[in-house]
Image (cartoon, coloured by chain):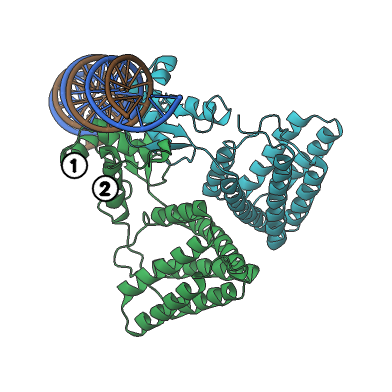
Chain colours: A green, B cyan, C brown, D blue
Amino acid sequence: MMNEGKTFGPRRATLAVEVRGEIERMIVEGDLAAGEKLNELSLSTMMGVSRGTVREAIRSLADSGLIDLIANRGAFVHETTLEEVRNLYELRGAIFGMACAAAARRVGAGQEPRLLAQIERNLEQMRATHAKADSARYYALNIEFHDLLLQGAGNPKAKMMYDNLVKEMHLFRRRGLSIANNIARSIKEHEVIVHAVAHGNAEGARQAALDHITSGFGRYTTMIDADPAATG
Amino acid sequence: MMNEGKTFGPRRATLAVEVRGEIERMIVEGDLAAGEKLNELSLSTMMGVSRGTVREAIRSLADSGLIDLIANRGAFVHETTLEEVRNLYELRGAIFGMACAAAARRVGAGQEPRLLAQIERNLEQMRATHAKADSARYYALNIEFHDLLLQGAGNPKAKMMYDNLVKEMHLFRRRGLSIANNIARSIKEHEVIVHAVAHGNAEGARQAALDHITSGFGRYTTMIDADPAATG
DNA sequence: AAAATGTTAATTGTTGACAAAATATGGTGC
DNA sequence: GCACCATATTTTGTCAACAATTAACATTTT
């Protein structure tokens, strides 16, 4: 069990790793607002750890896109503009498209024997959930749908990058906007993706996935235009 | 000049930021080998800073893909497998393809008046450099070519992610392999990309860019197959 | 009243000490 | 020679103190 030396999992994460997780949660869930300053002393007091530990946690978020580190001034929750969100969507479309193309190839080659059944079941559940107007449940299934395809692509790095992009998008928020908009259209797009993947049609899957994300951005900006409220 | 408050650039980067840069350089240039442990005390002595500063620098590399942080054991230069390199190439192809498509659209829309001239000039220089068998110069021009297109895409996040992917690829090395292999083919592929961009042909540019990266991976694995030497 | 200057307080950045965990070393038994 | 155990050493993780920089506030000048 120790024979792989370096890869043995430690029993417990370090305090700094736990603090990072908590800061990330606070940012993604909105407890820390975009542009807000991360005060080391306040955080260390709140979490019952030393300020140095908080510093380490904050530094570990340096490349995450969630915070901006400014020398001698501290760390601030990143303020994302709509232009940046557009860029994130563009990247998200490219990566999700690539992943769906890869998933389709792997399904076609018999490398992913369970993926098809999984996404079809998820799709069925999304339809049922939509019929019951249960948007929280739909949201969870939607995330699962994307996760399944990203896992099916067999490229863990792609999933990691995609998940980080989604996290970054949480920085741009509008109060009171519901998460789901035009679910019927969204489900229809999922169906097109599933159909292409089922037939091992990589190019069709890539295009359908890209269209789906692009369309999602269109739905997103439609919501924003309909709600001109200033940021929190 | 002070009126933008938070965005005013500090006069000097912190020591931890400088230490991070040095560690990154050591990794990318091979002074720190894949799998090698980053000893905090050694590094702090070597660089003339305290161990805490080295820790902060190392933590800031947590998400970079260049190192693995293991609780209670320390930080290790990430060991990249060929499978991981394949995944990185796949992502690289998706992002570069997306960037070239965006660049083509922007050229077609007149949003990038200088890009076309810049990449054509670069291409001309690559041809001349190849004719003189100056591979170091060719390498630099090749990097510039990719940079110009990524900048022309108008998506800074894409460029950042692409550059990080390239950095990660440096972790997988084979001693004695020359960087450039089949330059004539590579230049031909660059020409196809430039042609598509010049005509504002987004889909053509995307496909040409993807093919170029995919082909680059093929050239890469060909080199590896021809040199079965174990990692240094 | 607004701008400039000076002082004080708060915060960030760095360092070194201590505690905990991992690793290395030496001795013993089979 | 190998496996196991105890001990010593090294390294990592955390904490607190000090130094440097920035922000906030008060006073003076225009």
Q: Percent from the top left, x then y, of residue B178?
A: 73, 33
- Chain designation of label 1: A
Residue at (30, 63) in percent of width and height: A175
Of A147 and A184, the residue lying toward us: A147
The image shows residue A38, relative to residue B26, as above or below, that is: below
Of B71 and B30, the residue lying toward us: B71
Q: Secondary structure at mark 1?
A: helix
Residue at (61, 53) in percent of width and height: B90
The image shows residue A27, relative to residue B35, as above or below, that is: below
Amino acid type, callout 1:
Met
Upstream in the sequence, badge 1 or badge 2? 2
* Residue carrying label 1: A47
Q: Is residue A186 visible?
A: yes
Q: Percent from the top left, x then y, of residue D22?
A: 30, 29
Looking at the image, how many numbered discs can be counted on the residues? 2
- Chain designation of label 2: A
The local crowd at label 1, few if under 14, some if 14 to 19, many if 20 or more residues have their Cα within 10 Å, is some
Disc number at residue B32?
none
Q: Are marks 1 and 2 in contact (CB under 8 Å)?
A: yes
Of B170 and B109, the residue lying toward us: B170
Q: Percent from the top left, x then y, of residue B20?
A: 44, 28
Residue, far bottom: A131
